[in-house]
Amino acid sequence: MTADTTPAPKAEAAVRCTGLTYSFGATRAVDGLDLTVEQGEVFGLLGPNGAGKTTAIRAITTLLPVPAGMVSVFGLDCARKKMQVRRLLGYVPQQLSADSGLTGRENVELFARVFDVPRAERRARVDEALAAVDLSEAAGRLAGTYSGGMVRRLELAQALVSAPRLLILDEPTIGLDPLARAGVWDCIAQVRAATGMSVLVTTHYMDEADEHCARVALMHRGRIRAMGAPGDLRAELAAQLDADPARVSLEDVFRHHAGAGLTGADRPDEGGDFRDVRRSRAAARR
Amino acid sequence: MSAAPVPQPAAEHAPPTAPAGGTALLAGPRPVELRLLLTPPPPRHAWRLVLARMGAMCMVELQKLRHDRTELYTRAVQPALWLLIFGETFTRIRAIPTGGIPYLDFLAPGIIAQSAMFIAIFYGIMIIWERDSGVLTKLLVTPTPRAALVTGKAFAAGVKSVIQALVVVVLAALLGVALTWNPLRLLGVAAVVVLGSAFFSCLSMSIAGIVLTRDRLMGIGQAITMPLFFGSNALYPVSVMPGWLQAISKANPLSYEVDALRGLLLGIPAHLGADFAVLVVAAALGVTAASLLLGRLAK
Ligand SMILES: Nc1ncnc2c1ncn2[C@@H]1O[C@H](COP(=O)(O)OP(=O)(O)OP(=O)(O)O)[C@@H](O)[C@H]1O
Ligand SMILES: [Mg+2]
């Protein structure tokens, strides 16, 4: 792993975690995480339920303190320069989090307001964000009437309205049907192509990670088990197993590293806690 | 299942140029045009930021009320019953010394304060709901200091309470209570209700930050609202209370809110200066406590 202490590179990384450790009581959710997301790349954080992905993201988004290790976003320390870091971030949490009592437009407007978009520009900016996620027509409806895929795209619009340099998406396609998943990824790809922003994303869908991420990290029990371009990871495992590279999928790599533990027998105390499962269900229901 | 207007597979329209990034195998079907979303907005600072957040939170509250007014109506039922049944009956009995005014008049400001308090106490439950649904989490990742967020919520509670108070004022007027229509005094009434609700919403958000779950908070909310109400001068003057209750009433911000409302709405003698001072200090303490405890909800 990245144990070496290389001198600071020229371009500041979008995210740099070194030795990030976080515990909930006795549960060590993140255990010495080393991670770098380069500027402009789509980076996938993968791992089984309870691996610590959300916890790592919450440290990066300044929601959690950083008791051990160091987390920075574009060179800004996430524990100290919280306000400056937040101005660079667009964040879509794991739950479907649009306000169902407001219309789509009002949901985006709220985020334009709390990111200090000047009044003169607000309407045009909100329109642009809604158009970017293809919700212009539904913008006047209450978000409570949206389908899961629409809510996710609305949340993207909320995150994009402040022109973030780093977009952080925690399982953006959880509980969505295949078409809605493709719709969400389309939006991400298009906006990224237009803005060149960096994207940090978690997902349980290996096919999505393989298709959309420049690099991925496989996380298990709070640590990174493998990191690299999906193609490289596949080729590596193929070489190791002496198999045909074309027939090794990212899912095989995932199984290989997260391993036998996935059956559950091996890890009685882990796996997303009850709240996580309930949340994913709630997400799936909408 | 998705009723979403799934992007039409109008691949013909997509320009065949490769996207700028290295990764996308998938050329989007719908080229998006971004102008404004390329530059981040200029930051606001200090008090302008706090004012902007207060504006944003109040706006959300008003927008929600515009979409769904049922809460406004259902919450008018209880005050109506208090005024109609309790007020009318005790006016006849003349058991409570009110300093010469009809009991219904004496009661009306108390009921206004009570209905505003009930709305404000609900904010703790709301913030836990927002935490569970991710709305709060997302707001905490915006350039909004905790104190600004709490202040915004507190004033949103105030705005909602003022609208509710308006309903009760109209109800009372319909029942024949001789209220003032002096606009300056009514402005004072609005200020008192906002301050009182700011305090009670912060009290409730602080408790939310301590107990952390909705079920526990519901129990506590039930357990404190009635004592706050009965342990105040809303229903009867302080002079008829036993000594221990007088002490509680003196420490209860609701009493000061009611006193100020009586003074402003009915024109009877009140300690307006002291009332405002107590309410301002209480609201400031509430905002401080709730801001300090809000972080616990984020973990
Ligand atoms: N608020 C919390 N209190 C206590 N333990 C927690 C809390 N949040 C997470 N954990 C625990 O920390 C560990 C990591 O959880 P985390 O949510 O980061 O995993 P994850 O990789 O995001 O999982 P999933 O894929 O299910 O979302 C789990 O064992 C979980 O039970
Ligand atoms: Mg998670």
Image: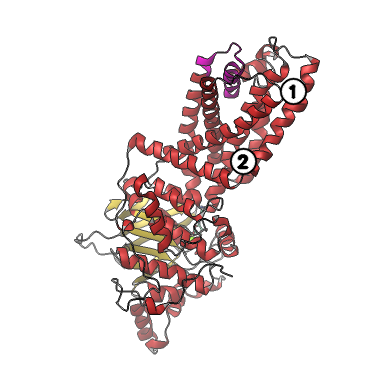
Q: Pointer 2: what residue?
A: B217
Q: Is residue B279 left or right of residue B266?
A: left
What amino acid does circle 1 point to? Gly
Question: Does the magenta run of residues contain B263?
Answer: yes
* Mark 1 burial class by Cα count in 10 Å: few <14, some 14-19, many 20+: many
**Badge 1 element:** helix
Q: Is residue A59 left or right of residue A5?
A: right
Q: Residue at x 47, y 62 (%)?
A: A135
The subunit carrying tag 1 is: B
Q: Residue at x 50, y 31 (%)?
A: B286
Front-most of residues B124 and A67: B124
- Tell me the chain of label 2: B
Q: Which residue is mark 1?
A: B87
Identify which amino acid the numbered label 2 is placed on.
Answer: Leu
Labels 1 and 2 in the same subunit: yes
Question: As rendered, which of B234 and B162 lies closer to the eye?
Answer: B162
Q: Look at the image and give the residue range highlighted in magenta.
A: B251-275
- The CB of the residue at mark 1 lies under 8 Å from ligand 1: no
Locate the C terminus of chain A by quadrant.
Answer: bottom right
| Residue at the (37%, 47%) spot, across then down | A115
Q: Is residue B199 above or below residue B3?
A: above
